[in-house]
């Protein structure tokens, strides 16, 4: 796989043909297809099946939803609470949920991946972080080489937080930055000087965090190609992140009404927005970072860059990962698990979640059991996302189907994309081109059997580019 970045095939006409709503494929089938017919009983059945595989490691995502204030660009599931207090009751409920999960999936499964997301996980005090970590690991022990990651907001994270997290064994830390331009920060109501983030990065490295990641967002009000290129350049030069995610801002005010506070007229759109990302990619690849896919980049030597070169990259609800755990449990409100061939999503509202757990029930309120066809298409989609190619022999050997016959409709839909230079179609498989790496979501969509179904509920997805 080439590390070069060829932008010559990209142009406004190409973008106009492919910039449309589409899934991000952290799951397949995607979350809007989950149904409330998948209830607690169905979830417990899947957990019992998972309990029959005690030697297989497990992945866990813990959702910590609290924030002191809501950023106007935010697309996460958060609970805004300027005053501390509600999080203590939430920790009590998390402990009860972990007890229920430990009982359901016994004998104990060890964790090879633990991720705390939010919200703002460091909304918790260092003492509360220690309490939660102990609650988790006393029920689900960590493997010796487990990846233990956390998302933090440098604006509310203290040195004591970092010291506590490192002492507890956290080895990967992600810091949201969005943009270094002060005008953009004011426009989105998130003031975060680069110096503050740099201090946190340096302290994290001094303490021994093995991987420090920075998250940026493109498509915010007042961003220009020139200003965002300067932002990325300053992040590379001053922070030297091990990984960098450059997310597309998803403007979905019908889902997140607070986004209406943003000035839409000041947002870059179309080719102007796309140019922000290509500028960022150009700076990162030019500085030696590997373009992992979608919006993720990794420095040479980083575990993710090494896994990419060795075809060991995986994808789950936490994004790209090198951890191959077959099962993942989600803990906390809105958390989604992937257990024994099914997705299980927890209640989205805090009162509903707390009522279920207090009553001794797992708080799952929707989900989906994957069919054999779902598993096939899920594997194909993730193969394209994670390796940027699809070997037809791999499909035949793993699933016993003839790819050219089984996916005839998908291959027909890919032909115009091949003509546009986004993918190469050969007798032995598919390979994403350098230009196609910017349109991965579009290249996956022909394999999605559910996209052609009528949509009576309004828009479900953000735009693909």
Image: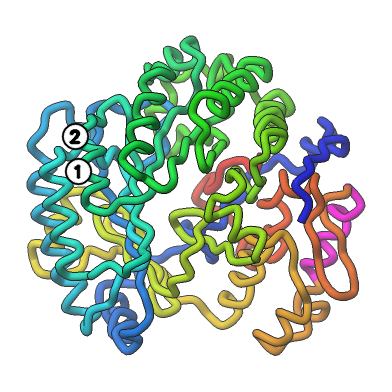
For mark 2, what is the residue? 160
In the rendered image, which quarter contains the N terminus? Answer: bottom right
Do we see residue 344 in this rendering? no
How is the model colour-coded?
A: rainbow
Residue extending furthest toward the top: 183
In the rendered image, which quarter contains the C terminus? Answer: top right
Where's residue 255, x and y in %? 43, 39
Q: Secondary structure at mark 1?
A: helix
Do we see residue 170 in this rendering? yes
Where's residue 288, x and y in %? 67, 39
Q: Which residue: 78% across, 36% down?
A: 16
Horizontally, residue 257 falls left or right of residue 275, namely left
Q: CA distance from mark 2 to mark 1?
A: 6 Å
CB contact under 8 Å: marks 2 and 1: yes
Q: Which residue: 35% across, 86% down?
A: 53
Q: Which residue: 76% across, 79% down?
A: 406
**122 above or below 63?**
above
For mark 1, what is the residue? 164
For the record, the magenta segment spans 409-420
In this rendered view, identify the residue nearer to me: 408 or 246: 246
Horizontally, residue 205 falls left or right of residue 436, namely left
Where's residue 404, x and y in %? 82, 77
Where's residue 425, x and y in %? 87, 64
Horizontally, residue 395 falls left or right of residue 458, namely right
Q: Is residue 416 magenta?
A: yes
């Amino acid at each position: 796989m080439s590390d070069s970045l060829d932008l010559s095939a990209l142009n406004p006409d190409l973008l106009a043909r492919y910039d449309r709503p589409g899934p991000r494929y952290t799951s397949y089938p995607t979350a809007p297809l989950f149904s409330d017919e998948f209830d607690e009983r169905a979830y417990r059945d899947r957990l019992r099946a998972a309990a029959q595989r005690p030697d297989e490691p497990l992945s866990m995502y813990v959702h910590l939803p609290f924030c002191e204030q809501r950023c106007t660009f935010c697309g996460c599931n958060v609970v805004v609470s300027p005053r501390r207090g509600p999080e203590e009751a939430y920790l009590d409920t998390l402990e009860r949920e972990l007890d229920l999960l430990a009982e359901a999936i016994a004998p104990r499964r060890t964790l090879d991946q633990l991720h705390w997301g939010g919200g703002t996980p460091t909304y918790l005090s260092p003492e509360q972080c220690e309490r939660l970590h102990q609650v988790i690991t006393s029920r689900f022990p960590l493997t010796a080489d487990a990846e233990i990651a956390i998302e933090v907001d440098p604006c509310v994270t203290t040195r004591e937080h970092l010291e506590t997290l490192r002492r507890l064994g956290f080895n990967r830390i992600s810091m949201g930055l969005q943009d270094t331009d002060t005008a953009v920060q004011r426009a989105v109501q998130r003031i975060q000087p680069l110096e503050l983030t740099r201090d946190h990065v340096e302290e994290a490295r001094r303490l021994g965090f093995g991987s420090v990641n920075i998250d940026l967002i493109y498509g915010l009000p007042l961003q220009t190609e020139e200003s965002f290129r300067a932002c990325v350049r300053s992040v590379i030069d001053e922070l030297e992140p091990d990984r960098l995610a450059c997310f597309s801002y998803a403007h979905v005010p019908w889902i997140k009404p607070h986004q209406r506070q943003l000035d839409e007229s000041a947002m870059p759109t179309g080719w102007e927005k796309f140019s922000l990302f290509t500028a960022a990619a150009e700076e990162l690849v030019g500085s030696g970072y590997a373009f992992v896919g979608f919006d993720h980049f990794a420095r040479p030597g980083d575990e993710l860059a090494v896994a990419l070169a060795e075809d060991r990259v995986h994808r789950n609800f936490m994004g790209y990962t090198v951890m191959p755990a077959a099962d993942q449990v989600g803990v906390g409100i809105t958390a989604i698990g992937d257990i024994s061939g099914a997705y299980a999503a927890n209640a989205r509202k805090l009162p509903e979640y707390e009522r279920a757990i207090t009553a001794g029930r797992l708080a799952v309120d929707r989900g989906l059991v994957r069919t054999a066809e779902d598993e096939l298409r899920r594997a194909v989609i993730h193969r394209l996302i994670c390796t940027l190619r699809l070997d037809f022999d791999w499909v035949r050997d793993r699933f016993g189907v003839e790819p050219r016959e089984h996916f005839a409709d998908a291959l027909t839909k890919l032909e115009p994309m091949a003509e546009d230079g986004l993918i190469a179609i050969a007798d032995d498989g598919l390979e994403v081109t350098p230009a196609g790496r910017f349109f991965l979501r579009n290249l996956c969509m022909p394999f999605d059997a559910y996209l052609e179904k009528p949509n009576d509920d309004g828009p479900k997805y953000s735009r693909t580019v």
